[in-house]
Image (cartoon, helix red, strand yellow):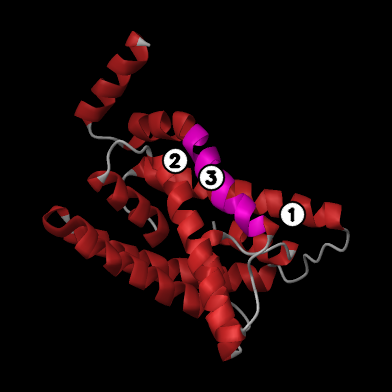
Amino acid sequence: MSVGVNLSIQADLGTSPISSIPTVPARVLGFDDIGVTTFIVNAVIALVQIPILRKKYDPILLLQIPVSTVFGLLCSASGTFLKGVTPSAYRDNRLVCIAGIVLVAVGVSTEVATNVTTLAGEGLALSLNKVTPKIKFGYMKVIVDCTLVVIAVIVSFSCLHELYGVREGTLAAAVFVGLIAKQLNKLTVPLADKFFAPPHRKERATEETTSD
């Protein structure tokens, strides 16, 4: 996911939704990468889930904070590694952006399928799913990402008095990461159930596959 995020940045068509907010303070503070601000924003999103879930809140969700720490470090590392990726033609920019969107979607689908813990952005979507179960995760992910983009636009104009870090690539990621992850879940969830799930979940997955 961190590689996907930085590919989106290098594509120069706008950052991914989860990084759209950290990008602005990183520029204001003069940081070379978004690792630190990514951690801060993810930690805030993780804590926001407490009032959303209230009595349904499970303290294990606080694992999103150390996971976000690792994600922030990986964003810094992959950002350094990918600095040489500088597409010049708009067509190449779009290809790099698409690669970033797909990688982020693969990461989202995988972390949700493992059912252990997630990054704060996906954790927020899952938490909202619990209070509004009629909306499927893929669509809730789109809603959360679009909301993050709107907040990023507000923060950008407030802090920099211009639109920064949000472009067509950001909007594409906000819409398609969740939709692609939704389709990938058809593959990743059964695989996760097969290899990592407790026996009762494996039996249920086998029964559902047989009935299908």
The reply to whether residue 129 is visible in this rendering is: yes
Which residue is identified by label 2? Answer: 138
In depth, the one of 203 and 142 nearer the eye is: 142
Report x, y in % for residue 108. 47, 48
Q: Earlier in the sequence, mark 3 or mark 1?
A: 1
Disc 3 secondary structure class: helix
Q: Residue at x 44, y 50 (%)?
A: 143
Residue 199, compared with residue 111, is above or below; it is above
Span shown in magenta: 169-184
Q: Earlier in the sequence, mark 1 or mark 2?
A: 1
Q: Which mark is residue 186?
A: none
In depth, the one of 53 and 205 nearer the eye is: 53
- Outermost residue toward the right? 89
Q: Which mark is residue 106?
A: 3
Q: Residue at x 55, y 52 (%)?
A: 174
Report x, y in % for residue 202. 28, 26
Report x, y in % for residue 118. 37, 54
Majority SS type along the magenta span? helix
Tell me the amino acid under the disc marked 1. Val
Tell me the amino acid under the disc marked 3. Val
Which residue is identified by label 1? Answer: 96
Residue 85, compared with residue 117, is above or below; it is below
How many dots with numbers? Answer: 3
Q: CA distance from mark 3 to mark 1?
A: 15 Å
